[in-house]
Structures are given as structure tokens and as C-alpha cells.
Amino acid sequence: PREVSVNANQNVTLTGLLITDPQLAAAASCPATALASDTSTTCSGTHAITQAEVAAGAAPSAARLKAGEDVYKVACIACHQDTGLGLPGAFPPLAKSDYLLADKQRAIGIVLNGLSGPVTVNGLAFNSVMPPMSQLNDDEVANIVTYVLNSFGNSGGVVTAAEVAKARAAT
């Protein structure tokens, strides 16, 4: 099974992940023989790497995605819908969203602080209000943003509770 976990020292542990970057594979202590000609490898065992290396290509665990989906179904689904397509003319899509994928830190900030005023998403204009989700803790925000970044046809990414805490402290 694929797994990503973070310990108290902010070290990340990857288990059974496809690693496409040779430097990331080296940092994860994958055996050199595991690198195929396409520079992809699946490491067996558990390898400790840093958060920066996670940003370079780790996939979130199924449990993390499920936790994010559960919070999404409570906090986001009414506006952004179960498909992530939003409501045309009212609430922007999260599905294949150029706005969302352009800036992970902005996405965290929007969940924490809300958003009002005009935005353009996938070439369409929206002008509505998203309230701040300040009732969510750092883990919940990290899980929900990670879920959205890896769902609805989006290209992926991982948000940590430490990133959310840093963003929260800055506001």
C-alpha cells in the first residue's frame, strides 16, 4: 500500500510509492538498481524523507484522502458539489481548476480566511462569497486541500498540517 506520514519532527515517511525523480529516490534511500530506464521506481519498505521532498512528488495516503473527502462532504459540498464542478455563475469549480492548482498556499489561505469578490476560474468569472472555514483544525484543512488537489481531475499535491499552521499564524 502507498502511505505518506509525518512525524513530530516534520520528517515524512513514504511507503511503497512510485518515485519518478532520481534525486528523490536517492533521498528516500531507494537502491540504485530500483531505478528503471525511465527513472521511475517503486521502493519497498519505508523511507524517511523531508517535507521538501514530499513536495517534489509524494502521493497522499488513501486514509488521508478519505479524511479530506469526509470533511469536504460536510464543509464544501453544498457550494462546490459532489463533482467539484461548483454551481455555474455562483460558485467556481474545483474540478480541473486552474485557479486552485496555480497556488497551493493561496488555496490554504482561502479555506482559512474565505474569499469574496471577483475571481476567474478556467476562463469564467465568478463574484461570490466563501466564508472562512475557521472552525476546521490544521489537520482538517490540510486533508481537505490535499483531497481537492487529488480529486476531480486535478493533478495532485500534498498539504501538511504544518503548512496550514504557518498560514494560519500569518493571518
Image: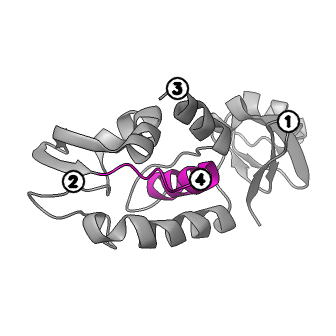
Residue 9 badge: 1
Disc 2 to disc 1, C-alpha distance? 37 Å
Disc 3 to disc 1, C-alpha distance? 21 Å
User: Residue 75: horizontal and vertical position, in percent?
Assistant: 41, 65
Q: Which residues are magenta?
A: 131-149
Mark closest to the chain's N terminus, 2 or 1? 1
Q: Is residue 52 visible?
A: yes
**Residue underneath mark 3:** 170
- Foreground: disc 4 or disc 2: 4
Task: Residue 151: say if magenta.
Answer: no
Disc 4 to disc 2, C-alpha distance? 24 Å
Mark closest to the chain's N terminus, 4 or 1? 1
Mark closest to the chain's N terminus, 4 or 2? 2
Q: Is residue 20 visible?
A: no
Disc 4 to disc 1, C-alpha distance? 19 Å
Dot 1: few (<14), some (14–19), or many (≥20) neighbours within 10 Å? few
Task: Residue 134: say if magenta.
Answer: yes
Q: Amino acid at mark 4?
A: Asn
> Element at badge 4?
loop
- Foreground: disc 3 or disc 2: 3
> Element at badge 2?
loop
Disc 3 to disc 2, C-alpha distance? 26 Å
> Element at badge 3?
loop
**Residue underneath mark 4:** 137
Mark closest to the chain's N terminus, 3 or 1? 1
The quadrant of the image that shows the N terminus is: bottom right
User: Residue 119: horizontal and vertical position, in percent?
Assistant: 18, 39
